[in-house]
Image: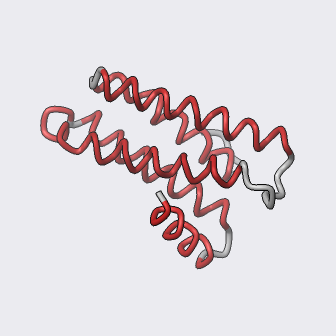
Amino acid sequence: MHHAAKAYGQVAQQTANPREREADLLLDAAARLQAIRDGWDARRSELDAALLNNRKLWTIFMTSATSPENPLPVGVRQNVVNLGLFVLKQTIAVLANPKPENLGTLININRELAAGLLNRAA
């Protein structure tokens, strides 16, 4: 996890707008999961890596939200953590029962949050 957080931090510093970078990462993770869902028979073998990527991303968000230095209001930070915990539970559910239709929730959450970060409707 430490390497992922460090890499995320370095990339985020290189961008002008961290919210846009976070949205891009969420959209990339959602697109990867969507591609697996759409091409299930051919791409099923990519599922574990895509879920790991998404889990790492959400772990970074939750870690940031719980940091005392985080400037966001407490309520927003709590919502990020709660949503992250839900994503982790959904990930476990997908791993326990890997079916293409079980990816929809993770895909939608990532897309919705990205839209919120970009201040637009999904």
- Point out the residue furthest to the bottom here: 14
Residue 10 to residue 30: above or below: below
Say which residue appears at 68% left-offset and 51% top-offset.
117
Number of labels in the image equals 0
- Point out the residue furthest to the left here: 42
Residue 81, position as x, y percentages in the image: 67, 39
Residue 83, quarter of the rendered image: top right
* In front of the other: 90 or 28: 90
* In front of the other: 115 or 12: 12
Residue 5, position as x, y percentages in the image: 53, 63
Residue 99, quarter of the rendered image: top left
Left or right, residue 48 beside residue 42: right
Residue 115 to residue 17: above or below: above
* In front of the other: 97 or 20: 97
Say which residue appears at 40% left-offset and 50% top-offset.
53
Say which quadrant the C terminus sits in.
Answer: top right
Say which residue appears at 52% left-offset and 33% top-offset.
87
- Point out the residue furthest to the right here: 73
Residue 45 to residue 67: above or below: above
Left or right, residue 90 beside residue 59: left
Left or right, residue 121 beside residue 95: right
Residue 52, position as x, y percentages in the image: 37, 46
Say which residue appears at 54% left-offset and 46% top-offset.
58
Colour convention:
secondary structure
Left or right, residue 34 beside residue 18: left
Residue 55, position as x, y percentages in the image: 45, 44
